[in-house]
Image (cartoon, helix red, strand yellow):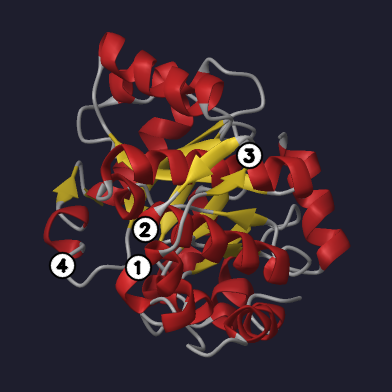
């Protein structure tokens, strides 16, 4: 998906919402967890049972309830890899379901990969060719070598960690390099090897006070902004300080939407919360 298509979706849905599909089995409603004890079910030509079945059914319901209110989904791979091969199959089924039912949605693999050379090429192949994601999150600590293989794909995106929302982020990200905080040096160097059509940056919603400064030297790139909802970030503040003339923001909420309700109405409630989050 290219930048103009992403912007058209923002305008059409009047939303900058990205729903993080960080599915924690233990937090699911009891009636969904109970599916893990049932038999196999077919989804997209695959058979699922156990926790994988519950994950797929939960994701399908959440996606159906929120797709009209969001422009992107962001599964965090850790929440699938922890269940082994069945978890990966559940992730693949989720991606296939979204691609089939809601092809306009932007799909982000929240993988935070960060290796170099042939390894980075294989990661890019896995996410862009085999699993058909639009973007993947990357840790740039090893430099440009760890990012460039992802930039070789047309209409695919590298999303580089810059200024994150976690409590200890500034331990390293605020360190000085040539008189600048490291996060700024990272962003500027990444901008040298990319364009606003294939590079985004992760900027936490809990750092909304810094968005004006970030936009002063990075006016055109999209920012993926986690931290809204359970982590306390404000979508309104993020939009006020971080939007640009192409939208420029994907504002992520995960737990605040997925687990807003634990009853049999969980999907409907998730849709209601999504409709009020990151809207324009």
209 vs 154: above or below: below
Which tag is nearer the camera, tag 4 or tag 2? 2
Measured in 3D between alpha carbons, the distance from the residue under mark 1 to the one under mark 2, in whole angstroms, is: 7 Å
Measured in 3D between alpha carbons, the distance from the residue under mark 3 to the one under mark 4, in whole angstroms, is: 36 Å
Q: Residue at x 44, y 62 (%)?
A: 38
- Helix, strand or loop under label 3: helix
Tell me whether circle 1 and circle 2 mark residues in contact (CB < 8 Å): yes
| Residue 134 seen in this snapshot | no
Q: Position of residue 56 (x, y in %)?
A: 52, 55
Measured in 3D between alpha carbons, the distance from the residue under mark 1 to the one under mark 4, in whole angstroms, is: 27 Å
- Helix, strand or loop under label 2: helix
| Residue 224 seen in this snapshot | yes
Of mark 3 and mark 4, the one earlier in the sequence is: 3
Give the label on residue 168, or none.
Answer: 4
Give the label on residue 25, or none.
Answer: 1
Which tag is nearer the camera, tag 1 or tag 4? 1
Q: Residues within 10 Å of mark 1 (few under 14, many from 20)?
A: some
245 vs 191: above or below: below
Q: Residue at x 67, y 65 (%)?
A: 16
Q: Residue at x 47, y 28 (%)?
A: 127
Of mark 4 and mark 2, the one earlier in the sequence is: 2
Q: Position of residue 79 (x, y in %)?
A: 33, 55
Q: Position of residue 2 (x, y in %)?
A: 72, 34
Of mark 2 and mark 3, the one earlier in the sequence is: 2
- Helix, strand or loop under label 4: loop
Measured in 3D between alpha carbons, the distance from the residue under mark 4 to the one under mark 2, in whole angstroms, is: 33 Å
Give the label on residue 51, or none.
Answer: 2
- Helix, strand or loop under label 1: helix
């Amino acid at each position: 998906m290219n930048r103009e298509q992403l912007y058209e979706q923002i305008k059409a849905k009047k939303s900058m919402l990205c729903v993080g599909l960080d599915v924690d089995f233990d937090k699911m409603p009891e009636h969904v967890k109970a599916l893990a004890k049932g038999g196999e079910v077919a989804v997209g030509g695959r058979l699922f049972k156990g926790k994988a079945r519950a994950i797929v059914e939960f994701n399908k319901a959440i996606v159906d309830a929120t797709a009209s209110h969001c422009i992107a989904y962001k599964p965090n791979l850790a929440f699938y890899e922890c269940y082994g091969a069945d978890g990966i199959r559940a992730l693949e089924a989720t991606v296939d379901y979204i691609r089939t039912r809601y092809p306009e949605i932007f799909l982000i693999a929240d993988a935070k990969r960060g290796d170099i050379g042939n390894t980075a090429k294989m990661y890019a192949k896995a996410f862009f060719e085999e699993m058909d994601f639009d973007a993947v999150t990357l840790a740039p600590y090893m430099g440009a070598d760890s990012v460039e293989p992802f930039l070789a794909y047309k209409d695919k995106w590298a999303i580089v960690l810059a200024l994150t929302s976690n409590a200890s982020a500034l331990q390293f990200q605020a360190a000085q390099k040539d008189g600048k905080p490291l996060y700024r040096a990272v962003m500027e160097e990444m901008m040298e090897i990319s364009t606003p059509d294939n590079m985004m940056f992760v900027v936490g919603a809990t750092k909304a006070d810094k968005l004006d400064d970030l936009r002063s030297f990075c006016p055109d790139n999209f920012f993926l902004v986690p931290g809204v909802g359970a982590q306390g970030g404000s979508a309104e503040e993020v939009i006020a300080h971080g939007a640009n003339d192409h939208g420029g923001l994907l504002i992520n909420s995960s737990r605040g939407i997925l687990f807003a309700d634990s009853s049999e109405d969980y999907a409907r409630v998730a849709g209601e919360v999504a409709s009020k989050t990151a809207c324009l």
